Image (cartoon, helix red, strand yellow):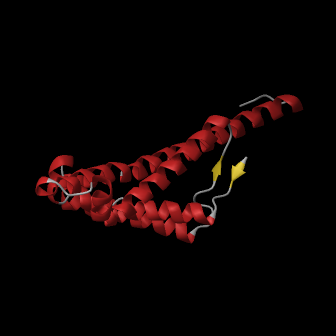
Amino acid sequence: MKTKASRSLKWLYCLILIVIIFPSGMLGASGWVGFATGGGLFTGGIVGLAILLAIFIYRIVLVVRSPHTLDAYVTSTPVKVLRNFGIVLMVIGLIGSLAVFFIRPLALGIFGKPGDAGVAFFVMGILLYVISSAGLAGLLVFEASRLFGFEAKLKDECRFPNERQAQLGGTPP
């Protein structure tokens, strides 16, 4: 069964592509969070970041211009579960990425005071960076569910013509 992508899913998909780089990728590459996480997106160098940015912009343009880009064949329950799990992970990643802008109030609300040298801000930054990385994982899981659905649909299409030829008395190729 072909499932059409809703407008909200398209928005979520495009926003995840944006927040993977801004602000989450920048947080992972800045200050003490960058030292603790290995540099975030800048570990591949500025050329790698530029290529990744170009791919993401291209994908956003495809989703915006073509109404059927994110449509998928949900052929079985595991594919449906995988698709929904990917969407949930993308929502969690988006919330974590937007919460990066509120590190100070969140840290003070949870810990009460910043502690020695602002360690509460550092801990909150690491936590939000890890939560925001769920967006990329969700994007990959969502795309895998689409791939599995298309492969199952293609397999069914390839199988049925041979059965139809056998019913008509012809020989399958």
- Looking at the image, which is closer to me, 169 or 41? 41
Residue found at x 56% / y 41%: 82
Quarter of the image for residue 102 reads bottom left
In percent of width and height, residue 42 lies at 20, 57
Residue found at x 62% / y 35%: 78
In percent of width and height, residue 70 lies at 58, 57
Query: In this orientation, does residue 158 appear?
Result: yes
Q: Residue furthest front?
A: 112
Side of 152 where 169 appears, left or right:
right
Q: Examine the rendered structure and indicate whether residue 135 appears above or below residue 159.
A: below
Numbered label tally: 0
Side of 161 where 132 appears, left or right:
left
Q: Examine the rendered structure and indicate whether residue 70 appears above or below residue 81.
A: below
In percent of width and height, residue 163 lies at 79, 31
Q: Residue furthest left?
A: 117
Query: In this orientation, does residue 23 appear?
Result: no
- Looking at the image, which is closer to me, 17 or 102? 102
The C terminus lies in quadrant: top right
